[in-house]
Amino acid sequence: MSKITFLDDNFQNKYKMFFLGLYNRNKRLLTLAAAIFFISLAIGVFIGYFLPDLTGHFLTILVQLLGSQIKKVTTLSIFLHNLQAALFVYSGGIIGIIPAVELFFNGLLYGSFVGYFTHGGVINNYGVSNPVNFIIYTLPHGIFEIPGFIIAGTAGFRLTSLVIGVINSMKRKRPVSEHYWKLKDSLALIVIAIILLSIAAIIEANFSVPIGNYITGLNLHHAVVENY
């Protein structure tokens, strides 16, 4: 029994140190990714609140588009949609600007919904007519989806630093192997992001709407608002 406990402790310590090291090496990039998302979210709230007509027109088209695809919404379809976005953000790190643009756009979109509903905008036939309802229906999966997307952006930024480091090393004729840890970190981060997005997909497809209906008393068939 003591031997098993000893092995368990070693296992836990090993992975604790791994995640702690991963965080410490990438906390600045994680902070940058989170800052871009939440700053753009604040801008989106501002735009949605003070430009309700323009925002309402755009959001109505978006909601109708998503609503027309309601029969296709499954755990797999949501996961594949989020996975595609996450991998695009990650691979875009090769160029550098794409992770920042994607994080900004997603924060702006989410914020515009909140700002529009705060102003009093209503999107008929879907029941999500105020910011409280919107948050209730998106929070269960959003607590996994938003961090997952931010971490995917962080992975993209780490990939950018890898490309820059390799180029600089080649110019200076230094071994590129010194940047290998950046590749490992970027892969670890995108795996974590994918795990979070898979959890978000399960919750969004199966639990977000029942939970929202129970809390609000509405009778929606599926949440039509989701982050890209």
Image: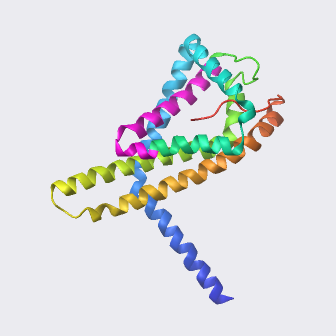
* Above or below, 177 relative to 122: below
Q: Which residues are magenta?
A: 90-118
Left or right side of 142 for 86: left
Q: Is residue 37 magenta?
A: no
Residue 7 place in picture, x, y as percent: 59, 82
The residue drawn where x is 48% and y is 69% is 17
* Above or below, 102 relative to 206: above
* Above or below, 215 relative to 87: above
As rendered, which of 206 and 144 lies closer to the eye? 206
Q: Is residue 104 magenta?
A: yes
Residue 117 place in picture, x, y as percent: 65, 21
What secondary structure prevails in the magenta region?
helix
The residue drawn where x is 64% and y is 83% is 5
Residue furthest to the top: 53
Left or right side of 184 for 179: left
> Which quadrant of the figure contains the N terminus?
bottom right
> Which quadrant of the figure contains the C terminus?
top right
Residue 109 place in picture, x, y as percent: 55, 28
Residue 220 place in picture, x, y as percent: 80, 29
Residue 138 falls in image quadrant = top right
As rendered, which of 138 and 93 lies closer to the eye? 93
The residue drawn where x is 63% and y is 34% is 226
